[in-house]
Image (spheres, grey):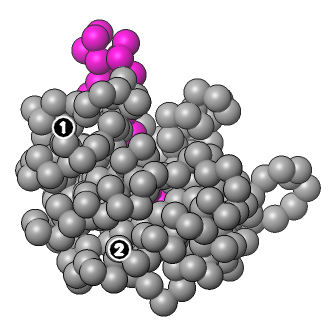
Amino acid sequence: MEKIIGANLKIYFKSKKEFKEYAEALVQEMNNINSDSLKVFVLPDFLNIPQASEIFKNTKIYLGAQDLFWEDYGPYTGAISPLILKDLGCTYIFIGHSERRRYFNENDQILNKKVHACYRTGLTPIILIGETEEERNYGLADITIEKQIRIILHDLPYDFLKNIIIMYEPVWAIGKADAATPEIIEYSHEFIRKTLSRIYDKNLGENMRVIYGGSVNLSNAAEILKIKGVDGLGATRASLNPHEFAKIIRFAEKM
């Protein structure tokens, strides 16, 4: 199965010029990488998506967005239409980042509506799931993850589910010096697959693409990619420098 490596740039770039320099440097790096067994995606902020679409055109880099609204169009001031994102060339959409939950009060029911919007418009959701530190400390990690899977994926066609990506990103690991332990990562990825097998069937559970996010960096990326059941990585801080991000991509290239 191909490895999936992604960059969530959040709103770290403060000008169009700054992002343009980043994007062009990443394209140059990708010219020296054999991406036949890889999928590399970049999620810029919304205002940089149009120029990213131009810079990444005819390259090995897939474009995506960090969020979307659950309706295609209408009187929703400040919202972002999935149709616009599709028209701009986006392929992947983050759904359910913990910062969306924390700062914008999104819950699993809202995320389910956003995944349905992806289904309607032909976008591929990258669904982020994971437990908080409190939930892990109280032994509720598995219950939390299963609840998220059941609600966020509710009432979606089976053929669509086969194409989505799940990112396990424990909330307590975000922004730390290092990622979750290999033991936790392997167990959690296996639990996600077993849960999908139990809810749907073994084929979906075994073939669902599950990647890891949460304090991925140059020192741990290669080791995480070796963990059983890990199909790729999502990074933020480690992706803000295009040359360092390219090193992580090269780790995956060698797998």
Say whether residue 84 is visible: yes
Q: Residue at x 35, y 17 (%)?
A: 133
Is residue 186 placed above or below 70 in the rendered structure?
Answer: above
Image coords of residue 162 (percent x, y): 33, 67
User: What residue is at 18 percent from the left and 37 percent from the top?
Assistant: 185
42 vs 166, left or right, is right
Mark 2 and mark 1 in contact (Cβ < 8 Å)? no
Q: Is residue 20 left or right of residue 94?
A: right
- Residue 135: horizontal and vertical position, in percent? 35, 17
Q: Which mark is residue 185?
A: 1
**Which residue type carries mark 1?**
Ile
* Magenta-tinted stretch: 124-143
Q: Residue furthest top?
A: 138
Decide whether residue 136 is among the magenta residues: yes
Q: Quadrant of the N terminus?
A: bottom left
The secondary structure type at the circle numbered 2 is helix
Horizontal side of 147 relative to 178 (left or right) equals: right
- Mark number displayed over residue 196: none
Query: Which amino acid type is marked by label 2?
Result: Glu
Residue marked by disc 2: 29
Please identify, in this view, whether the residue under mark 1 or under mark 2 is nearer the observer: 2
Front position in the image: 161 or 67? 67
Question: How many angstroms separate mark 1 from mark 2 (CA)?
Answer: 29 Å
**Residue 205 screen position, x and y as percent:** 21, 56
Q: For residue 176, what is the image quadrant?
A: top left
